[in-house]
Image: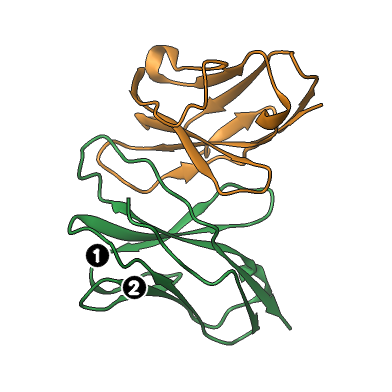
Chain colours: A orange, B green
Amino acid sequence: EAGVTQFPSHSVIEKGQTVTLRCDPISGHDNLYWYRRVMGKEIKFLLHFVKESKQDESGMPNNRFLAERTGGTYSTLKVQPAELEDSGVYFCASSPLAQSEQYFGPGTRLTVT
Amino acid sequence: LAKTTQPISMDSYEGQEVNITCSHNNIATNDYITWYQQFPSQGPRFIIQGYKTKVTNEVASLFIPADRKSSTLSLPRVSLSDTAVYYCLVGEGKGLTGGGNKLTFGTGTQLKVEL
């Protein structure tokens, strides 16, 4: 069974540009989460989808970040416009309903210059 | 969410047992204790979860005293491949809310295993 996949693995963009990160969860997992680690700090929660609905987006830093999960399958996280402080590693995780163990993808390393 | 405190780093040698202790003094009644492992350039990976007493799986054991204010992750006979960051997390587990739960990561413990 394939694990959680994320694309791209690494993205380098200039300040002010737009970047879209993609996450493909494990098939059948209704829970999908986004996390990020910036500037060597701790991994922080961004938001949580249950199927296509946003269950909790309390961790989204500001309105430059937009997450979608159309159809309840893969998810995208768009940063527009990107700022220097957005640099970091963005992780996606998924889990079945009523299960707390989360399966993480390898992350997307975003570098904003 | 309960805050956790764990050592920043630990060193060990191959074949030894490693015990990493985590403090969580304000753990709530419905909180579970979960440990994740993270290798460089990878996402965190679930190791073990428990509520009280002792839990054991094929990878590790988790010891939780009666007051649940701390927990100890035990890795038997570590190898070089166990070099990683280990995170202790406290929060609702077992999907008690029915819809999953967000994880709150601390700084973790960097375990280094040498020959």
Chain under numbered label 2: B
Question: On screen, B65 above or below A41?
Answer: below
Question: On screen, A103 above or below B30?
Answer: above
Q: Mark 1 points at which residue?
A: B51
Q: Do labels 1 and 2 share a chain?
A: yes
Question: On screen, B62 above or below B39?
Answer: below
Nearer to us of marks 1 and 2 is 2
Please tell me the numbered disc located at residue B30.
none
Q: Quadrant of residue B73?
A: bottom left
Question: On screen, A30 above or below B69?
Answer: above
Q: Which residue lies furthest to the left in this view?
A: B29
Q: Quadrant of residue A79?
A: top right
Q: What residue type is labelled 2?
A: Ser
Residue B74 lies, in percent from the top left, at 44, 78
Camera sees residue A19: yes
At mark 2, the secondary structure is strand
**Marks 1 and 2, how far apart in space?**
11 Å
Question: Which of B54/B66 is in front?
Answer: B66
Q: Which amino acid does label 1 sit on?
A: Tyr
Left or right? Give the position of A106 relative to B59: right
Residue B50 lies, in percent from the top left, at 29, 64
Left or right? Give the position of B115 relative to B99: right
Chain under numbered label 1: B
